[in-house]
């Protein structure tokens, strides 16, 4: 890793953050992933009384099966309960295999429980905020989407993950999805500044490509 690589990664990291103002919502949705910090931060927000209902969504992927053998959402629920969130406040959606399904399956689960939110607080990994916003806005346009994630800088996230190359690979991979998914009908378009596109191209050329989709 070089200082240039990290400077480019910082540009992409900052771009992925939506910087929405935290405000109360009818429900929060914690998006499953390898990052248990999503559940921890969702529990903190629950204790601030920002929402009465919390959905954890996510089954498994090749990158999480070993870490969360019972499924992402199940492990997230267990973490939140450990942190004092009442089990009755949590709904578990454990079938979703991608971000679009996270939202459509959560919407259906909430409707089946008689909950039809007007505003949804989406809790995700820090670098997934923008993709989560673009996806939710596409598949669930009738709700207002507010995004939130653990208040970490890139250095802190690097320390948490413990694999510097993987961190940059993940930033690059999520940006590819932000750029390409609108044409596939998976998300609404997002403006991508030229310096962010240049950083993306440079990092791919430098070999940070393990999380790219073909």
Image: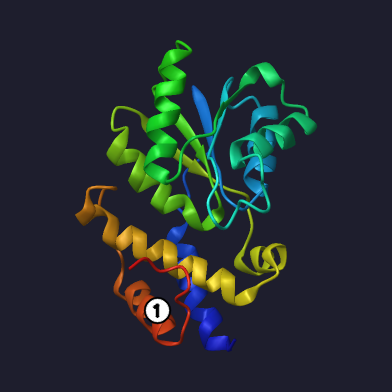
Horizontal and vertical percent position of residue 9: 50, 74
Residue 145 appears in the figure: no
- 37 left or right, relative to 110: right
- Name the quarter where the N terminus is drawn: bottom right
As drawn, 4 above or below 26: below
Decide if residue 204 is in sight here.
Answer: yes
Residue 76 position by quadrant: top right
Secondary element type, mark 1: helix
Instruction: Tell me where residue 22 appears, x and y as whole percent.
Output: 53, 38
Position of residue 26 in the picture relative to residue 116 (left or right): right
x 40%, y 78%: residue: 199
Q: Residue at x 64, y 24 (%)?
A: 49
Instruction: Say how many tags the image has.
Output: 1
Residue shown at 40% from the left, 69% from the top: 212
Disc 1: CA contacts within 10 A as few (<14), some (14-19) or many (>=20): many
Quadrant of the image occupied by residue 40 = top right
For this view, does 203 lie left or right of residue 198?
right
The residue under the point 66% across, 46% down is: 68
Colour basis: rainbow
Q: For this rendering, which residue is in front, 6 or 55?
A: 55
Judge from the rendering whether residue 184 lies leftward or rightward of residue 125; answer left or right.
left
Foreground of the two, 208 or 2: 208
Q: If the image is split into quadrants, where does the C terminus sit? A: bottom left
Q: Which residue is mark 1?
A: 199
Q: Looking at the image, which is closer to me, 100 or 70?
A: 70
Q: Position of residue 75 (x, y in %)?
A: 68, 39
Depicted 62 relative to depicted 71: above or below: below
């Amino acid at each position: 890793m070089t200082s240039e690589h990290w400077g480019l990664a910082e540009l992409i990291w900052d771009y992925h953050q939506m910087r929405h103002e935290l405000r109360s919502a009818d429900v929060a949705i914690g998006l499953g992933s390898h990052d248990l910090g999503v559940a921890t931060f969702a529990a903190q927000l629950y204790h601030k009384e920002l929402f009465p209902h919390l959905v954890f969504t996510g089954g498994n992927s090749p990158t999480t099966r070993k870490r969360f053998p019972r499924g992402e959402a199940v492990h997230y629920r267990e973490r939140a309960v450990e942190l004092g969130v009442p089990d009755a406040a949590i709904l578990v959606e454990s079938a979703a295999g991608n971000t679009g399904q996270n939202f459509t399956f959560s919407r259906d689960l909430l409707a089946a429980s008689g909950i039809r939110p007007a505003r949804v607080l989406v809790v995700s990994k820090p670098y997934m905020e923008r993709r989560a916003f673009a996806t939710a806005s596409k598949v669930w346009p009738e709700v207002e989407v507010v995004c939130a994630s653990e208040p970490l800088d890139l250095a802190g996230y690097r320390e948490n993950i413990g694999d510097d190359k993987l961190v940059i690979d993940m930033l690059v991979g999520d940006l590819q999805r932000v750029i390409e998914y609108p044409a596939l009908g998976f998300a609404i378009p997002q403006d991508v500044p030229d310096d962010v596109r240049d950083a993306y191209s440079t990092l791919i050329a430098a070999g940070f490509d393990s999380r790219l989709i073909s």
